[in-house]
Image: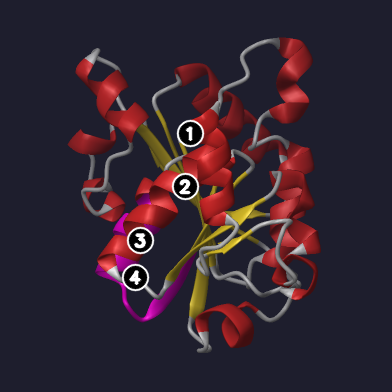
Amino acid sequence: MRDKIKRFQQIAEWPNVICPEKELYENIKGQWGSLQFKNSNDIVLELACGRGEYTVGLAQLFKDRNFIGVDIKGDRIWVGSGQARKLGLANAAFLRTQIQFLPRFFEPGEVNEIWITFPDPRPKLRDEKHRLTNNLYLDIYKPLVIPGGYINLKTDNTGLFDYTLEVLAERQDIRNLAFTHDLYSSPYNSQHFGIKTKYETKFYEMGESIKYLKFQFDHA
């Protein structure tokens, strides 16, 4: 418990974390470029980022883009934000909030791309509303992402992956859907840039194939 409290205190002081204890938390919406990153580069989100492996990994690879890991767990954000600080990644930041509150922090069209990496599959039917690829969440993402911006999903969970494909098939606003049930053996392998999360490594070593899909919204 002491370590957890200490971590919360540290991220409240670190400039690469936007959390309720900071003034920016209330006025960052629409101003990520000017107030946080000090540039006008594209913004990419990693939702339910956990330790922020993709936020940190992508920020290392693409210095001309800005990356924001979003998660409610402050002790997990502490790991990713601490690593970003050690690596001197000025283009990596973290936001501590729940995913359903994204519209409080981003203006329509402020986001260029979204990654959803190994989210909780929420297998019970009563928890469907909490799956990050259900229609409630897709309707949240759609206005925030620019036309042509991709939504990416990586998961080891077959149930969640198949559920997501069913949800997307029923919608009329999905374009350029591409997917594979075995990422590492597919033409899309290079599109995950060799970045592996803690859970990805764990489940892959257990014999689970890694599933991947991407799509765009039709904003017409």
Q: With respect to residue 197, does 21 lie above or below? A: below
In the image, 115: left or right of 207?
Answer: right
Dot 2, how many residues are within 10 Å of its Cα: few (below 14), some (14-19), or many (20+)?
many
Residue corresponding to mark 2 = 78
How many angstroms separate mark 2 from mark 3 (CA)? 10 Å
Q: What kind of residue is marked 2?
A: Trp
- Give the foreground label among 2 and 1: 1
Looking at the image, which is closer to me, 198 or 163? 198
Residue corresponding to mark 1 = 3
Q: Is residue 90 visible?
A: yes
Residue corresponding to mark 3 = 84
Q: What kind of residue is marked 4?
A: Leu
N-terminal of the pair, mark 4 or mark 2, is 2
Instruction: Read off the magenta span.
Output: 54-67
Q: Which quadrant does the N terminus fall into? A: top right
N-terminal of the pair, mark 2 or mark 1, is 1
User: Is label 1 in contact with label 3 (beta carbons under 8 Å)?
Assistant: no
* Mark 1 secondary-structure assignment: helix
Residue corresponding to mark 4 = 89
N-terminal of the pair, mark 3 or mark 4, is 3
Q: With respect to residue 192, does 58 lie above or below? A: below
Q: What kind of residue is marked 3?
A: Ala
- Give the foreground label among 1 and 4: 1
* Mark 4 secondary-structure assignment: loop
Q: With respect to residue 11, does 28 lie above or below? A: below
